[in-house]
Structures are given as structure tokens and as C-alpha cells.
Image (tube, coloured by chain):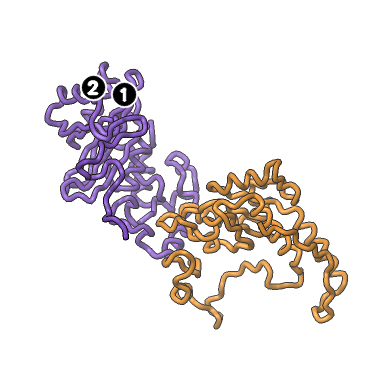
Amino acid sequence: MSDSFELQYPGSALGNAPAPVSPSNVPNRGGEVNPSAAALREQFGDAISRVEVVWGDTNVYVRPDRALDVIRWLHDDPTQRYDYLSDVTAVEYRDADFPIEVIWHLRSLPFRRFLRVKAQLEKNAPLEVTSVWSIYKCADWLERECFDMFGIKFVGHPDLRRILMWEQYREGFPLRKDFPLRGRFSRAEQLRQALAANPEARYSMEELSIADAFEDLPTEMRSRLRGGERTGE
Amino acid sequence: MGLTPRPEKRVVEYNPTSQEGWVATRLDFLVNWGRANSLWPMPFGTACCAIEFMATAASRFDLARFGMERMSFSPRQADVLICAGRVPFKLAPVIRRIWQQMPQPKWAIAMGACASTGNIFDNYAVVQGIDTIIPVDVYVPGCPPRPEGLMYGIMLLQEKVKRERMTDEGIRNEMEPDPNSKLYIPAPVIDELSEPFGNSVHQTRSGL
């Protein structure tokens, strides 16, 4: 005989459960709010939909169309000076209203602050958000990875193409919830396609212009190369 | 560990029906002895197995005892390809090209569970065993294998090399299957007949 099952770990939905804390006594919800959040509220008003503190880190939810303005202000304003972009990523929820959100991890080295900016993309709208490449050059590869895994288009990115999977990958976006773990094609087909690829066709745009693999690239990428487009700076 | 030393087999048996003369067998012995004790490895390290491989090559375990101290980072001067780590599909054409660049005679060791079968990475990105791309002589189990395990695999490979015969025509035959042959079975049929096998229900045997 065993007792009825109850969630026992901290953070469970039990009414009498103690509020969960981390080993160093950081509470799960609540705590000290990053002062940048109040400054953002003052500066942008309605564009900031929600502010919450999770495990000691402040999350700020912004409207996707204002995300670039918010991040640019955080970077440029002398009282904020978020000069370091740690990460750009996305999360897909099985949520009817906000299926997918884009997340920027910002760090202010002069003020020793960390801020997480989230933009929940609208449902039934194209998966698009403005690129922050014009502010942080390191966003180049981060946004490419995000595009590769989720298919989110970063408008204004100089060279938005796949970075982890290869150019000719046709199975979709692997981190989407509807993507099967083993991919869409059979193992035999996956291997056939992979072996048919030209290993040289993975160079950067600059190297590609001198490599032999030019003809193996997709048409759209070739046309971009012909136009003299270059990556990065 | 079950790593008992194998009895060394230096005597080449004489079989009168095998049409081989004494000279040829002694020459085989000499050539195989030379090849088995100077295998130059081409390390293809992609993951944690490569760390164990480095430990094997370093002073404590000392791969040089087997004549393998010369890591050949150019496939054109290599004898044995040691694939240590998981191989994603993006690397599949790379490892095949490296294998094709290696001159004969050549052998391959799949070191660790990922290179042998794909291990737990039964997902969209990882090749389910490099034997779907290149022929493999020795599979070393483990995640990652201990250096002793890799050395045992190398000793097995040496034993395999020592048993080779020049008169064996089937050895190191790299011919593609002939579609006009009556024995030819198309790849989809092989896939259909052989499915499933390994740790994945989607893994197929034809390699195509």
C-alpha cells in the first residue's frame, strides 16, 4: 500500500508548500527588481506589458514591434548602458495565444545588471521580429541560429541563413514543437541527402566566392553572392 | 576487464590446398607484421571520445607501444581512421571524403557508442553509426571507452591485419554494387527487408 500521490518538491501547487527558494536563498518569484524595468516603464509606457522577477532575474515583456527601440534605448542611454548581448533565443510554448517568444539576454557591464527582454510574437502573424544587429554586431550568428532552429525571420539581418544545419536542409526547423525528434525524412533519405551535399559548400560568403562549390549553392544564395553582398561589417 | 593477453600467433600455418607457397606465406607474414605494428591513425575526433583517445595517445597509456605514435592529420598518410565521437549528418560527406582520400590498405575503428550506433542521439541530426557511410573493421563499445578498451580494439585490429593474405581477392574491394548483376538488390528493398535494426526504428542498412 502506498499513500496517494502528492507533489512534494518545492514549487508545487500545494497550498501549504513553502515558497521555493534556491540554495542561496533566491526566491522563485519576487525579490529585488532591476531598476532598469522602472526606467523602461517610464520611458516606453504601454510598450512594456509585464515585468516579473524569476529566480532573481528581471524579465521584461515588450511588444514585438517596439523591441528594437527598447533595446536600442537600453544600449544607448547613459543611465542604462547595456553594452553586452549575451544571447538571443526563442521559446515555443504550446500556448494558444502566444505560441512563440523571442528572448534577448542583456548585460550591463558598467552597472552590473542583467535584464531579460522578451517579446511574445502574435498568433497568426508572420514570425518576424526586428534584428538587433545594428546595435550589437554579435547578434549576427545568434539570430542566424534562432532562424535556423525556429524559422523566425529577423528583419534587417545582413545575412539571414542557416548556421547549424546546412543550406540545403529541407526538413524544417528542428526546435519547433511540431518537428519530430528524428526529423521528417527516413534515415535512408536523410543520409542520402547528407552525402549528396558538397562539403566545400559550407564556407562563409567570402571564402565561397573563391571556392569551387559555388555552383552547388541554392539559387537565391548565388544571386546574393553575385551582387557582391558580404557578411559582417 | 576481460582483457587477458591474447596468445601471440606468429606461426603461419601451411595448408597445401591453399595454392600458396612457402615464400608467399612468409612474405605475407612479413608485410602484415610491418603493417600491424606501424598503423598510423587518422584521428577523427568530434566529441568526448576524442578526449579518451588523446589520453590513449599520451604518456600514461602510450599508443606509441603499438607503433601508432604518429598521428596523421592528413588522410593521405594514414592507415587507420579512428572515428571518436558522434557524427552529425553535416559531417557525413566530410568523413566519407576523408575515407576516400586515405590510400589502401586502410582500416577504420568506430570508437564509442556514438560512432558505432548513434548511441542516445537517435535524433534528426546524428548519423546512426558510421558504418552506414564507411566500412568499419572494429567497433569499440563504451561511452566513452576507457583507453584500455580502445587499446583492446587496436589489438583486435592488429590481429585482423596479421591474418590478411595477399592472395585473398575479396579483401579491400571497394567496388560499387553492379545494378546489372543478378545478385543486385536495390537499396530500397534492402531497407524494407532490414528494417528495423539497431536502436532506431528508422535506421536502415543499405546506407543509401
Q: Position of residue A25 (x, y in %)?
A: 32, 30
Residue contact between numbered discs 1 and 2, judged by CB atoms under 8 Å: yes
The residue where tag 1 is placed is A113
Q: Looking at the picture, tell me which residue is in the foreground, A199 or A57.
A: A57
Identify which residue is drawn at 58% across, 44% down: B51
Sequence order check, earlier mark of 1 and 2: 2
Farthest front residue in view:
A1
Q: Looking at the picture, tell me which residue is in the foreground, A223 or B55.
A: B55
Q: Secondary structure at mark 1?
A: strand
Quarter occupied by the N terminus of chain A:
bottom left
Q: Secondary structure at mark 2?
A: helix
Q: Position of residue A115 (x, y in %)?
A: 28, 29
Identify which residue is drawn at 70% across, 45% down: B61
Q: Which subunit holds the residue at mark 1?
A: A
Q: Amino acid at mark 1?
A: Arg
- Chain A rendered in what hue? purple
Real-space CA distance between mark 1 and mark 2, rounded to the nearest whole angstrom: 9 Å
Quarter occupied by the C terminus of chain A:
top left
Q: Which mark is residue A35?
A: 2
Dot 2: few (<14), some (14–19), or many (≥20) neighbours within 10 Å?
A: few
- Chain B rendered in what hue? orange
Identify which residue is drawn at 25% across, 25% down: A32
Identify which residue is drawn at 24% across, 34% down: A29
